[in-house]
Amino acid sequence: MDARTFLETERLRLRAFTDAPADEDRLVALDGDPEVMRYLSGGRPTPREEVRDRVLPRLQRRYAGLGGLPGYWAAEERATGSFLGWFEFRPLADDSAAVVELGYRLNRAAWGRGYATEGSRALVRRGFTELGVERVIAVTMAVNARSRRVMEKAGLAYARTFFADWPEAIEGSEHGEVEYAVTRGEWGHRQEHLS
């Protein structure tokens, strides 16, 4: 494992984003796919300027509550080094890792291969065993069945449905957003029953 690597699983390597033009290009391509952006922007691509000036700096931001670690990780396939997308494991409060939000955005070539579940499970485990996390939450549109299934497979359970006030409604937003969650105690209890 090299110094930039935060976490490795059987098939994934998670690393910090860099200022390298290649990372900007990868994010432009990811956010330029209408299917990837379907439940985020209604399929509208994110312009390069926005990726460079807003998205990439947000993905590189470091959090005191995580000991200065970033809250987002570039995901690469270990076998090939191919960029797959990113995972979010970001504290809701800058100075505390008590509650973190789990998220993921993977390119279409990575869909249906179990990468989102594999990366999410590894992050949840790292959060509860090494980072002092007490609760993990994840949010998606209620109609995003694939993302909801990943949350369940990662050990989170449905917590609530809520309606956010978005500047522009996208197809399916009338059904609201759902939050899934798991606490350290709930996760630990499940791990005991698995062994």
Image (tube, helix red, strand yellow):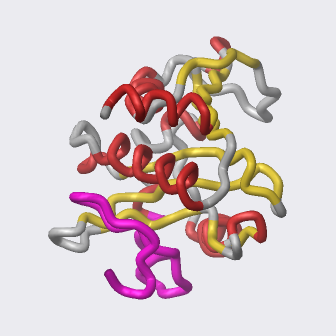
Instruction: Based on the picture, tell me whether residue 2 belongs to the magenta stretch.
Output: yes
Query: Is residue 147 visible in the rendered structure shown here?
Result: no
Relative to 160, say whether 93 is above or below: below
Give the magenta range: 1-28
Q: Quadrant of residue 150?
A: top left
Relative to 47, say whether 163 is above or below: above
Instruction: Based on the picture, tell me whether residue 21 belongs to the magenta stretch.
Output: yes
Residue 11 location, x and y as percent? Answer: 22, 59
The residue depicted at 58 percent of the width and 25 percent of the height is: 141
Residue 74 location, x and y as percent? Answer: 45, 67
The residue depicted at 44 percent of the width and 83 percent of the height is: 4
Query: 92 and 168: which one is in front?
Result: 92
Does residue 67 appear to the left or right of 24 in the view shown?
A: right
Q: Quadrant of residue 76?
A: bottom left
Does residue 37 appear to the left or right of 160 in the view shown?
A: left
In the rendered image, the residue lying farthest to the left is 79
Does residue 113 appear to the left or right of 83 in the view shown?
A: left
Q: Quadrant of the N terminus?
A: bottom left
The residue depicted at 50 percent of the width and 47 percent of the height is: 124
